[in-house]
Amino acid sequence: MHATAELAERISTISVSSTLKVSADAERLRREGVDVVDFGAGEPDFPTPANIKQAAVRAIEANFTKYTNAGGTQELREAICERHHIDFGTNYSFAECMATVGGKHAIFNVTQALINPGDEVIIPVPYWVTYKDVVNYAGGRCVFVQTDESTGFEVSAAMIARHITPQTKLVIINSPSNPSGGVISREEFKAIFDLTSRRGVYLMTDECYCRFLYDSQPFSIAALPGAKEHVVVAGSLSKTYAMTGWRVGFALAPAHVIGAMMKLQSHSTSNPTSIAQKAAVEAVRGPQGSVAEMLAEYRRRRDFVIERLRQIRGVSIVMPKGAFYAYPNISVAFSGGRLANSFEFATALLEEAHVAVVPGEAFGTQNHVRISYAASMTELERGLDRLHKFIDRVRE
C-alpha cells in the first residue's frame, strides 16, 4: 500500500501554511550562507517588554509550572475580559472567555465548534491563509467575497448580503486585515453585524491587529448592544505585546460556544503554558505604553515602504490603514513573460534577489505579494532596493 493512502482524508483538505513555508525557505538559504532580507514573517521585531518577561521569571521562581484549567486560569480569563472592557467597552464574564495557544488556536477551535459538514462560511478576499484551511478541515464550504484595490480591499455589508444563503453559518472579518492592512469603518462593520444578526449567522471578528490602527480609534464590534449573542471574538497577545513565541491567544463568545471550544481544547492541547499565562496577565494588566511605541514606529516604516513602492514604475499599492503589511500589486513584473503569477514572482525574488515575501495566492489573489514591514529600517531599505532592481530586471 502506498504510504499516503494510510493518511486520514481530512488531512488532504488542508495545505501547508504559506507564511511558515516562506520563513522555512528563507531560513534554508540563510543556513547556506545567503544574505536574505526577510519580509515574510508576520512577527514584530521588537522584544517582549521587560515587565512581561519578568512576570514569567517570577512564575518560574514561584514554581507556577503545573497544569491549569484547560481554558486558562481564572486570573488570566478575568484579566482578558477586563482589558477588552477597558479598550472597547465590552462586558464579558469569566464563563464567556477562554485562553488558547495563540490566536490561530482560537480560530481553529471556533470553526471546529461551530461548523458542520456543508455549512457555508463567508470570507472576504484577500484573507489570512488559515481561514480557508480550518473551514475545509471542519468540512465546511468557503464562500469568498471578492474585494479590490479601488475600495482599499474593504468589504461591505451589501457585498456580504449577496452571498448569504440558508447554509451560511459564519462570516469571518479581519480588520485591520492581514494581508492588506485594510480597515473596515465602524459604520460599515455595524451594518455587517446588523445583517448577520438579523439572518441568524455568527460573526467572527479576528482582532489580532486591533490595537494597530493609524487613522482611527480601535473599536470592537462586540461592544454593540446585543452583539454578545451573535459575535465571536478571536484575539491574540502575539502582535500587540510582541509575544509571538509565547503562544497566548483568547476567545470571547457566548458561554455555550466557549464551553464547546473548551471541550475540544481539553482533548487537544489542554491549557496554554502556565508560565506564559502569568506573563499574559502582566501584559494585559500592566503598562500599555509599548503598544503606542510600536504603533508609532510601524507608522514611520509604513510611510517609508509605501513611498518606496510607489517609486517602482507600474507597481500600485493601497495605503494600509492598520496592521504592519503592505500588499502591492506587482503584476507589472509579469509583462516580460518569464513570470506568470505572484507565486512565481516570490519564488524568483527569493532565489535571485534573496528577498522573502509571501505570494498573493496564499491570500486568494494572483497579482500581489505581502510585505511585512515589521523589520528594521535598514532591512527595509536593503530589501526594497533589491525588490526595485528585480522588478526592473524581469520587465526587460
Image: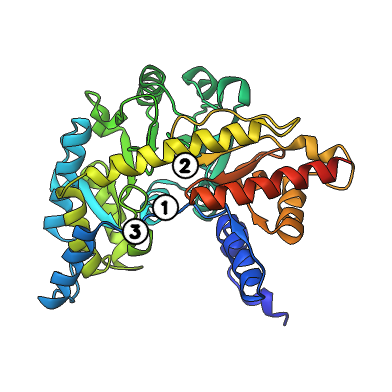
* Residue designated by label 2: 324
Q: CA distance from mark 3 to mark 1?
A: 8 Å
Residue 111 in the image: x percent, y percent?
42, 49
Where disc 2 sits, the SS reads loop
Q: What's under tag 2, amino acid-wise?
A: Phe
**SS at circle 3:** loop
Q: Looking at the image, do the residues carrying marks 2 and 3 touch, with CB atoms under 8 Å apart?
A: no
Pick whichever, 294 or 158, lies toward us.
Answer: 294
Does the rendering let one see residue 284? yes
Circle 3 Cα neighbour tier, 10 Å, few/some/many (<14 / 14–19 / ≥20): few
**Which residue is denoted by mark 3 in the rendering?**
47
Mark 2–mark 1 CB contact (< 8 Å): yes
Among the two numbered marks 2 and 3 on one chain, the one whose residue lies closer to the N terminus: 3
* Colouring used for the render: rainbow
How far from the left and from the top, in percent, is residue 270? Answer: 29, 68
Q: Residues within 10 Å of mark 1 (few under 14, many from 20)?
A: many
| Up-down relation of residue 227 to residue 243 (above or below) | above
Q: Mark 3 belongs to which amino acid?
A: Pro
Question: Which type of secondary structure does the marked residue at label 1 adopt?
Answer: loop
Q: Earlier in the sequence, mark 2 or mark 1?
A: 1
To which quarter of the image does residue 15 belong? Answer: bottom right
Question: Which circle marks residue 44 in the picture?
Answer: 1
Q: Residue at x 17, y 52 (%)?
A: 77
Is the C-beta separation of discs 3 and 1 under 8 Å? no
